[in-house]
Amino acid sequence: MDWKLEFIFILIKFTVSLGDVLDNRGYEFIIAFMENRPYPKNMELFVATFSGDIVNVTVSTPKYYGKYSVHRQFQLSRGRAEHVSINTKLQMFGSTLSPKGILIQATDEIIVYGVNRRADSVDAFLGLPTDVLGGEYYAVSFLPTEKRSHSKHYAQLLVVANFEDTQVQITFPESDDFSNVTFDGNEYDGGETLAITMNRCEALQLQINGYGDMTGAYLQSDKPVAFFSGNARTVVGNGYTSDHLVEQLISTDRWGKQFVVVPVPGRDVGDYLKVVGYIGSTEIDIKCISNNPINTSVRIVLAKAGSYQLLEMEPRSYCYIVSNNSIFVVYIVKSRQQNDFHDPSMIMIPPMEQYAPEYVFTTIRLVNGMYKNYFLFVVEQENKDGLRLDGMPFPADTDYVSIPNTTLVAGYVMVGEGFHRFYHMSPISVFGGILYGQYSFESYGLPVGLRMAEINKADGAWMVRLTVLTVVEDIQHIPETVLLGARKKSQFKNTNNIAFPKTRTIAEMPVPGPSYASRAVGITTVEVRNAATKTCDSDTETDMACCIKAFFKTVIATTTIAIKTESEPSIPINKLPGLKK
């Protein structure tokens, strides 16, 4: 098919310095603890840093006064973790609004883990800093397998406000697994919305009445909030132990489309995966391999936003998940069975798009005893030899399992108690990581870290595409497109990594309407996120084009540039880790 360029786009090569990464490290965190079983045992925070400077940290409850309030100050240095005990009275109880938000502030970047511990009931979450909180979330919990009269197994969610006068709306799922929620004397059924105004450090916990599942509850807020969900306690599967489930969830603008699941070590039973859809007509392919070996493949379709599906894996299954739309994935560990010494835990699986080249973390400690701690990893096959744990190569007997339909391998290594640094020798090689710990009648799991790029939602003036138009005789035959590969932190990066996707990938780009006639979008597309230097402040198309051209030092042979703002930005397919061509 003959076609001609109507405009020419010339890119001058240049270098952009990279600012601070948007990830799980930060200067300020705001969290709270959901209800766990009532037996007295304090909750815990673990705080650590990799900064080379002395870091001053303050942990406080600014709105909670009285005997159990918190005001703790301490200093951190690289490689040292501080344990902060939080009195059990500061956990949330029932469906209530309470000033139990906990504020953690530091003079340099820190990492934070929360541990909600009771006797034989514990789970942990990775704290997310306030600069990556969002205003749109979906809750995830588990439908209790067994109803027990002596123990609350409620599904629940928790919101913590980061700003004064925050308007929050929570719409409950229209699902057979959902019953209802009672708050402030009002009962809310599926499909109904609870609206509330919250102030900074206020925490709102909502629990299902009876035995039900909170998955799919949809939160919107006009200002960023911290969001948690899970279960007070629950039995998972056919086992006989129950445990607390919790994760701090990432907002929908940070969801992804590709995931790798690594099984927790030492299990002879298959655990669960739960996937939640962001929009309707979401098609998800899941391919797994286990060491039996058993290969399984399944496709599921999520019909609408917030719909979900629970999947049971074969024992010791390594799985690859790919979706046509962004999704959220959690791994739910089953209850103990016979001599299988694992307890329920809920683990957020990081999207592959949010993998990072380095993680620093600390294991969780026991007062009496010690967890068996494991680092579960996912990395490109060709990059596995560059992985380092505290400066040393992985053990020679590390087993690397090939992930179906990818160029990735995955596995796990045991780690000792304390502070650790996992990284890759190449700063541009990314990998995924999960921390899992197991002890008699206790298990915990959480991602050790992740990037927090807004890969699933544009933000008006701050996420635009410059597209040079081409003229084609047949709109069905669009020429190949040039994409500039990018990895976002606070600035654009890797602008010289130019990919050449095939024509079929243009489906991810703006498609012209009938008014364009034979004119098709093509040839050159540039994605811009949070440009470090704004040369003008207007959000109009003309001025925004001016800003972006100035920032990229780009010479364009024509001023005719089409600007498109997309709700789900395109990512160059051959720049995502692990995808086979």
Image (tube, helix red, strand yellow):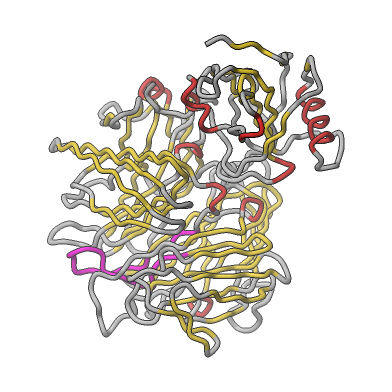
- Looking at the image, residue 106 sits to the left or right of residue 574; the answer is right
Question: Can residue 78 be seen here?
Answer: no
Q: Is residue 329 above or below residue 287?
A: below
Instruction: Answer with left or right where residue 375 lies relative to residue 92.
Output: left
Q: Is residue 243 magenta?
A: yes
| Magenta segment main secondary structure | strand
Closer to us: 267 or 194: 194
Q: Is residue 569 above or below residue 207?
A: above
Nearest the eye: 413 or 191: 191
Report x, y in % for residue 325.
Answer: 46, 43
Quadrant containing the C terminus in the rendered view:
top left
Residue in the picture at 66% in, 74% down = 198
Q: Position of residue 549 (x, y in %)?
A: 79, 25
Query: Where does residue 475 sit, x and y in percent of width and height?
Result: 55, 24
Determine the image quadrant of residue 61: bottom right
Q: How many marks?
A: 0
412 or 458: nearer the viewer: 458
* Direction bottom: furthest residue: 185
Report the magenta residues as a range.
229-248
Q: Nearer the viewer, residue 86 or 311?
A: 311
Quarter of the image where one finds residue 215: bottom left
Residue 490 can be seen in this image: yes
Left or right: 119 in relation to 68: left
Identify the residue at image location x=46%, y=63%.
Answer: 139
Membership of 162 in magenta stretch: no
Q: Quadrant of residue 173?
A: bottom left
Q: Residue at x 41, y 22 (%)?
A: 383
Q: Position of residue 116 (x, y in %)?
A: 44, 67
Is 557 left or right of 294, judged from the image as shown? right
